[in-house]
Image (cartoon, helix red, strand yellow):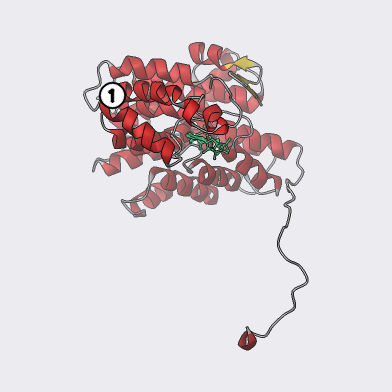
Amino acid sequence: MSLVEDNKLVYRGYDIDELVEHAEYEEVAYLLLNGELPDKTQLRDFKQELTRHRAISPFIRELLAQMSENATAMDVLRTAASASASEDPAEGDNSQDAEYRKAIRLTAKLPTILAAYIRRRRGEQPIPPDPALGHAENFARMTWGTKMHPRAVEVLNAAFILQAEHGMNASTFAARITAGTGADMHAAVTAAFGALKGPLHGGATDGTMRMLDEIGSPDHVEAFVDKAIERKYKFSGFGHRVYRTEDPRAKHLRRFASELSRTWQGPPYFEIQDRLARAIAERRPKMSPAAAEKVNVVNVDYFAATTYTFLGIPADLGTSIFALGRIAGWCGHIMEQHADNRLIRPESEYTGPVGKRWVPVAER
Ligand SMILES: CC(C)(COP(=O)(O)OP(=O)(O)OC[C@H]1O[C@@H](n2cnc3c(N)ncnc32)[C@H](O)[C@@H]1OP(=O)(O)O)[C@@H](O)C(=O)NCCC(=O)NCCS
């Protein structure tokens, strides 16, 4: 579905630099699910389908209401995605056509679920989706009503596109392993949610905000980095398994973070980030060669974290915004897996003992 090489990310033939400049998220979601960009009619129909499925059922509304107020956004999204299998009309049908429809339903509903969660945390009633609005705008509207940041729609649209797909990353791999057993799309998406949550993957978005809060001020950066190197701390938002020089998504998010920071009234996160990146770069010679290579790359999560924060998204919700974008990529991969399936079963090398004899419990 995509080419991931150092400083290069291509979705189904299209460089993300092109897509982020010109596309709506709906066009990219269509591209990932169908392999080609939609023409005018296809895009209109696709948007209509998303519109038709944005509202959540009384069952999911009740589930959200019953979940603990302390549940994290990722736990809520994962649970709701899993639970929605039980009301999906094509549950158990792994045909391409049925999965395409499930992908649309999941893509349409996740923003509604997350917005309802965000409003509940603020003690506010949910705002229903508006059929006149597109994907990013609906999420912004359901989250903030009319009091959204003036750049929210455009920036969220771009962020959803940048996060939509990324080859065989951990969450997508989890989805494909699950789909590879013949399990259905909801099972595979639920597995993907579980993997995305971790701090070494999508959880690094929320981890970045925690790190910036811990640093607290630009003046504390250098001392923080010196101590961090001593204790082999992993800086959230740095390092990548594939990219060696640049994560091609980071520059776009840095541009948004930089722009939005100018009107941001809170802590000087962007100043801390820039000084932190400089301080880490200067201290690379003090690190092991492997660590020096890893911290050379600022990854997607670093500036996504502040971009979302500056739009007014609470610091612990960055990873869940990531998931709203990634759902299209996950679903595309699940369809690809099911279209030509074979069980994924890596072998592991056992290094423990063999030949031990059973000893009754009283004699152990
Ligand atoms: C992305 C990541 C998981 C890739 O990890 P990896 O390819 O498995 O690399 P390893 O964890 O084996 O690390 C290799 C070395 O680099 C160091 N390292 C890796 N990422 C580091 C980071 N962000 N900060 C400091 N040191 C880092 C490790 O400590 C290790 O050092 P050592 O050899 O001296 O023990 C890793 O860079 C990381 O944990 N980054 C922070 C979390 C993050 O931003 N994740 C989002 C990725 S998009």
Q: Residue 130, position in %: x, y?
A: 37, 28
Residue displayed at 50% across by 23% down: 162
| Residue 222 placement, left or right of 335 | left
Residue displayed at 72% across by 80% down: 358
Q: Which of 200 and 316 is in front in this view?
A: 200
Quadrant of the rendered image containing residue 206: top left
Q: Nearer the viewer, residue 12 or 82?
A: 12
| Residue 15 placement, left or right of 133 | right
Can see residue 133?
no
Above or below, comparing residue 174 to residue 252 in the picture: below
Can see residue 84?
yes
Residue at the farthest bottom position: 362
Q: Which residue type carries mark 1?
A: Met
Disc 1 target residue = 148
Quarter of the image that includes the C terminus: bottom right
Dot 1: element: loop
Q: Residue 354, position in %: x, y?
A: 76, 67
Q: Residue 304, position in %: x, y?
A: 41, 26
| Residue 135 placement, left or right of 43 | left
Count all numbered tags in the image, as a single digit: 1
Above or below, comparing residue 89 to residue 30 in the picture: below
Residue at the farthest left position: 265
Q: Residue 149, position in %: x, y?
A: 29, 21
Q: Residues within 10 Å of mark 1 (few under 14, many from 20)?
A: some
Quarter of the image that includes the N terminus: top right
| Residue 202 placement, left or right of 343 | left
Residue displayed at 35% across by 39% down: 316
